[in-house]
Amino acid sequence: MLTPGLNEEYSVYLDNAATSFPKPEQVYEAVLRTMRDVGASPGRGGYHRSLEAGRILFQAREAAADFFSISDSSRIIFTQNATEALNLALQGTLVAGDHVVTTSMEHNSLLRPLYALRNKGVELSIVPVASDGVVDVEDIRRVVRVNTRMIAVSHVSNVCGAIQPIRQLAELCREIGVLFLVDAAQSAGYLPIDVEHGAIDLLAVPGHKGLLGPAGTGLLYAASHVPLRPVIQGGTGSHSTAEEQPQVMPEGFEAGTHNLPGIAGLHAGIEFIRARGLSAVYQHEFNLLNQAEQALRDISGVTVYGPSNNSERCAVLSFTASGVDSALLAAELDHGFDIAVRAGLHCAPLAHRMLGTLPGGTVRLSPGWSTTSEEIAFFSDAVVQCISKIRKSA
Ligand SMILES: Cc1ncc(COP(=O)(O)O)c(C=O)c1O
């Protein structure tokens, strides 16, 4: 039986929305094997180590393509995280005079590149969402203009876990002939994403969250009809006499040395999820979030944000306790119980304006593949104790 209290044997990590931890053993092994036994850079030499590195890179690309139902793996560009993928998707397609529509639920990794583009003449509409965090497709339709070039949304909110209606948004994009960019930072590895049937033109994915790869991994999928421009210039191992960056997929968009150990680890993470089954991963997450939500709602003065129905939520749960500072509660959980949760704005300030949780933000928990029901029970008990301690000392 687990007892709350500082216990060196027992540390609970509930911040998988930031980055997943722990990784499956296979991921650590793939990273180590690639660093120690292969060592070379792909596409940079004709010797056998470099060829083996090229094979590892290709196989990881194929696995990622298969995972998201992408028929041509060369449309996948490896990046170092979702932020880089989003920057490439936005800066590599939009020009002054274009109009983009997004929502008030977005992460700064989507908003800040858009603000920077706005300073260069790109027009931006940010559509407010309902109090459950879900955007109304008709609200998006209402702001579309003749020069609208793209609709860009996150699949799942990293603040309250609300799942956006990406199927209907994709249909709208097809109907009006604009690009559809999906930020899958909180959905990849949890929800099924069928890129081609789902009519997604650009998909930004972190490798280090739900896909269980190492930090420093991510990818961007760009459909063949997307006229993507590289935003980083440099060596590609091919077309070496060209002065201009070759716009060849994928290497023209992956200038410089790859994070091959990371990419090998990402491949192992994808295989791990595939072997477990995406629906089993989702169900596990759903059960834990359900358990946490019920326990939190039983605590007096606690408010849980986002969809009231947990089937409309994925990956994360945010809450506040009346009279309790979120940062202090997270610190108490860490210091008193060795429980890692995140407090604050979670890099999504507009979402908090909508939820009414400015300036302190919320406490966010995000369980992962290895989180257990006992850990959620331990967390819930710890929250009760921390809230009571903070309220008493106020
Ligand atoms: C919705 C959303 N988009 C983008 C990002 C950025 O992801 P990365 O840390 O891989 O750059 C995050 C990270 O938390 C996120 O939650």
Image (tube, rainbow, N blue to C red):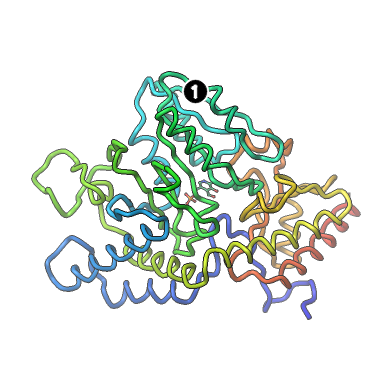
Image x and y of residue 258, in percent = 29, 58
Q: How many marks?
A: 1
Q: 60 and 349: which one is in front?
A: 60
Q: Position of residue 333 (x, y in %)?
A: 74, 61
Mark 1 C-beta to ligand 1 under 8 Å: no
Q: Is residue 145 left or right of residue 302?
A: left
Q: Residue 66 lies in what quarter of the image?
A: bottom left
Image point 77% across, 68% down: which residue? Answer: 377
The x, y position of residue 344, in whole percent, is 67, 46
- Using the rendered image of the protein, determine whether residue 358 is visible from the camera's viewpoint: no
Amino acid carrying label 1: it is: Val
56 on left or right of 338: left
Q: Residues within 10 Å of mark 1 (few under 14, many from 20)?
A: some
Quarter occupied by residue 232: top left
Q: Is residue 60 above or below residue 315?
A: below
Depth check: 109 or 153 in front? 153
Q: Nearer the viewer, residue 180 or 78?
A: 180
